[in-house]
Amino acid sequence: MKLQQALASLAMAGTIALAMPAAPTYADGAASTRNILLLGGAAATYLIIQHNRKVHEKYAEDAQRQAALEQQNSDAWAAYTQEQRAYNEEVSVNRSLEKEVAYQHNIVEQQRAQLVALNVHPDFATQQVAMVSYGWGEL
């Protein structure tokens, strides 16, 4: 950026130097008009260069902002996709556990039916079983 400003200033100074006569001359109407036009042209050129520089800076900032937004969108999409995968895995694990619980429930029901068929009292499974103590306290 400073290089562009330096080049623009150098171009302006060069234009002014070329517009200025090397030796004193009489200021006739043609020379005065020519000098005004040259200086006006140099000033217009400088203003156009500065305007274009600002426009290009603005475009670069907009492009950088757009790239950052696209990166955020990409990151958000990747996070969403990862969360969706994790959710699907959790659903799969839950279904597997539900199948296991249903299987165990069926086994328990079968065993209860067998106990009923053998005329075993229903509270048989809930009765206190004798405990052996080895002197470590109650377990």
Image (spheres, grey):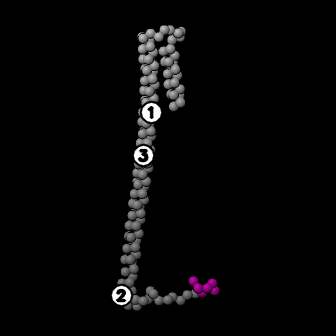
Query: Few, some or many C-alpha atoms within 10 Å of disc 2 (few <14, some 14-19, many ≥20)?
Result: few
The magenta-colored residue range is 133-139
Residue located beneath label 2 in the image: 117
Q: CA distance from mark 3 to mark 2?
A: 71 Å
- SS category of the residue bearing label 1: helix
Q: Quadrant of residue 48?
A: top left
What residue sits 39% from the left and 64% below the top? 91
Along the viewing direction, whichever of 30 and 136 lies nearer the viewer = 30
What residue sits 53% from the left and 89% below the top? 130
Query: Few, some or many C-alpha atoms within 10 Å of disc 1 (few <14, some 14-19, many ≥20)?
Result: few
Q: Nearer the viewer, mark 1 or mark 2?
A: 1
Say whether residue 11 is left or right of residue 99. Answer: right
Q: CA distance from mark 3 to mark 1?
A: 22 Å
Is residue 71 depicted above or below 6 in this figure? Answer: below
Along the viewing direction, whichever of 53 and 131 lies nearer the viewer = 53
Residue located beneath label 3 in the image: 69
Mark 3 or 1 closer to N-term? 1
Mark 3 or 2 closer to N-term? 3
Residue located beneath label 1 in the image: 54
